[in-house]
Image (cartoon, rainbow, N blue to C red):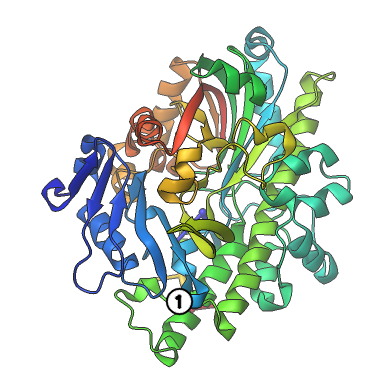
DNA sequence: ATGTCC
């Protein structure tokens, strides 16, 4: 990106002044080097989002921002329903409520390393992964609707998770306001055999080691110590979310004209929040959020079973679960007034600061855990939401490393088998049904997660708490 | 991301 088009506010905050129909400025939170490496398309997309009706404050981009469908991935934008604000299927993304959860294990590095291969194999055998993978649970129509309404709470009620997990999930594991009637039978059909599956692409399950602590006080509150073994799960709403996104995107392109909305880009198809289709999408998307929460809960259940095969006395407790493709109704202060806003986070993590009422009592003083997934062979990070972040971008932070290369380009440069061998030499065991998938996800196809996280910390979006490195990765 | 194109 041409940095000369931006105004420097600080080393980690840059502004695009509103021009040509932009209602608000654009704000990018990133270091100069990360911005120089961003595609020019990201600039275009940030400015296009700023042209949508009812946008409040600014169109934001997180340090891991890259070119997405309509909105940039790493984009955050909030809309005011009282000012004609819109909701956009492309602003949420296709993999609705894709997210990360991290589990404590209580295992030592020695325990895991002495059983590294066995653990990798049993996890790979137990957790279905890959494109089109199906699970051991099959939902009839009634159960499908119960799942779409109940989320992780539905899974726990059926013995597929712990009650204690629920307070460690955004929305306490159940997104209110889901409307399964707004989800097509086709979307439900695609999902009925896919519960408890990882999926493909950048989705994974990782066994990780805590290698660095940056904030002892918050780490202690989160239950993180140096050399701890954690397990992180990254996946979303599978075929259901994708189908909902596809269908509503088409409908919103058509309906935009009816509502007098001029789209700066077809991919930014959207509808007024206070419109029939806007409300329908909201109900469907909330169902997909519950689908992703239930999916991660079931995968957690399967992971607990798998780990018990090798370590019978170990039980995994949930640290936290974050979603990073959502649109949520939240209260934020705008010019000194509390406003109800619909906050789109696409490839961006909610990062509420200390004291926020949405956080459970056990985490409220520390701030929300922000779980940042790396790539195979590189680090993941745990951060904490800050008070400052609430003012900067509605309490939001980055979500991962962010791609810097297309999947196609990656498969031209690398072979999956070589990547797996290289990582094995570094002590990281990979298990995947797809060699090509591994090549597409090669660590070097991503930005340096260390730079991304440092920018998020320095910009004030979140505070670095701990760094984790992978030992085992089950890759979709 | 995705029954990797209805």
Residue name at image x 36 percent, y 36 percent: A459
Q: Position of residue A96 (x, y in %)?
A: 56, 59
Q: What element carries label 1?
A: helix
Q: Name the one closer to the observer, A183 or A392.
A: A392
Residue A146 in view here? yes
User: Is residue A109 placed above or below A472 in the rendered structure?
Assistant: above
**Count of numbered circles in the view:** 1
Q: Is residue A170 above or below residue A150?
A: above
Q: Position of residue A253 (x, y in %)?
A: 42, 82
- Residue visible at 53% across and 48% down in the picture: A200
Q: Position of residue A64 (x, y in %)?
A: 36, 43
**Pointer 1 residue:** A83
Q: Residues within 10 Å of mark 1 (few under 14, many from 20)?
A: few
Q: Does A438 appear above or below A46?
A: above
The residue most toward the top is A110
Residue farthest along the bottom direction in this orientation: A258
Q: Nearer the viewer, residue A92 or A240?
A: A92
| Residue A426 x, y percent position in the rendering | 44, 16
Q: In this view, does A43 lie to the left or right of A397?
A: left
Quarter of the rendering occupied by the C terminus of chain A: top right
Q: In this view, does A201 lie to the left or right of A165?
A: left
Q: Which chain carries label 1?
A: A
């Amino acid at each position: 990106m041409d940095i000369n088009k931006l105004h420097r506010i600080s080393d980690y905050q840059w502004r695009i002044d509103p021009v040509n129909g932009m209602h608000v400025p654009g704000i990018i939170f990133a270091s100069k080097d990360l911005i120089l490496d961003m595609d020019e398309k990201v600039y275009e997309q940030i400015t296009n989002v700023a042209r949508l009706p009812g946008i409040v404050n600014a169109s934001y981009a997180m340090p891991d921002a890259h070119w997405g469908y309509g909105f940039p991935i790493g984009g955050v934008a909030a809309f005011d329903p009282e000012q004609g604000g819109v909701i956009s299927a492309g602003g949420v993304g296709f993999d609705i409520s894709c997210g990360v959860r991290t589990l404590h294990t209580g295992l030592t590095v020695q325990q895991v390393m002495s059983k590294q291969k066995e653990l990798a194999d049993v996890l790979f055998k137990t957790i279905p992964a890959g494109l089109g993978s199906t699970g051991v649970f099959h939902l009839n129509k009634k159960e499908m609707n119960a799942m779409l309404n109940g989320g992780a709470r539905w899974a726990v009620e059926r013995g597929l998770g712990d009650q204690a997990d629920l307070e460690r999930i955004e929305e306490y594991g159940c997104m209110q306001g889901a409307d399964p009637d707004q989800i097509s039978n086709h979307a439900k059909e695609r999902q009925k055999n896919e519960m408890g599956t990882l999926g493909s692409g950048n989705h994974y399950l990782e066994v990780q080691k805590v290698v660095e602590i940056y904030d002892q006080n918050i780490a202690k509150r989160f239950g993180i110590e140096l050399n701890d073994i954690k397990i992180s799960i990254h996946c979303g709403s599978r075929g259901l979310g994708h189908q909902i996104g596809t269908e509503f995107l088409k409908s919103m392109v058509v309906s935009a004209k009816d509502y007098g909305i001029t789209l700066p880009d077809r991919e930014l198809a959207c509808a007024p929040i206070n419109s029939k289709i806007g409300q329908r999408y909201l109900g469907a998307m909330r169902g997909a959020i519950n689908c992703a929460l239930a999916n991660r809960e079931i995968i957690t259940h399967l992971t607990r079973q798998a780990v018990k095969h090798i370590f019978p006395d170990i039980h995994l407790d949930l640290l936290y679960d974050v979603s990073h493709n959502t649109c949520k109704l939240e209260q934020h202060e705008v010019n000194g007034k509390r406003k109800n806003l619909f906050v789109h986070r696409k490839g961006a993590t909610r990062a509420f600061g200390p004291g926020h009422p949405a956080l459970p009592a056990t985490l409220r003083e520390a701030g929300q855990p922000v779980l940042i997934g790396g790539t195979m062979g590189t680090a993941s990070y745990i951060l904490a939401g800050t008070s400052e972040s609430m003012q900067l971008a509605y309490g939001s932070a980055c979500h991962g490393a962010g791609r810097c290369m297309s999947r196609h380009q990656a498969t031209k440069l690398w072979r999956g088998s070589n990547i797996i061998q290289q990582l094995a030499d570094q002590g990281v065991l990979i298990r995947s049904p797809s060699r090509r998938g591994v090549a597409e996800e090669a660590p070097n196809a991503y930005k340096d997660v260390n730079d991304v996280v440092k920018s998020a910390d320095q910009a004030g979006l979140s505070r670095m708490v701990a760094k984790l490195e992978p030992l085992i990765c089950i890759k979709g």
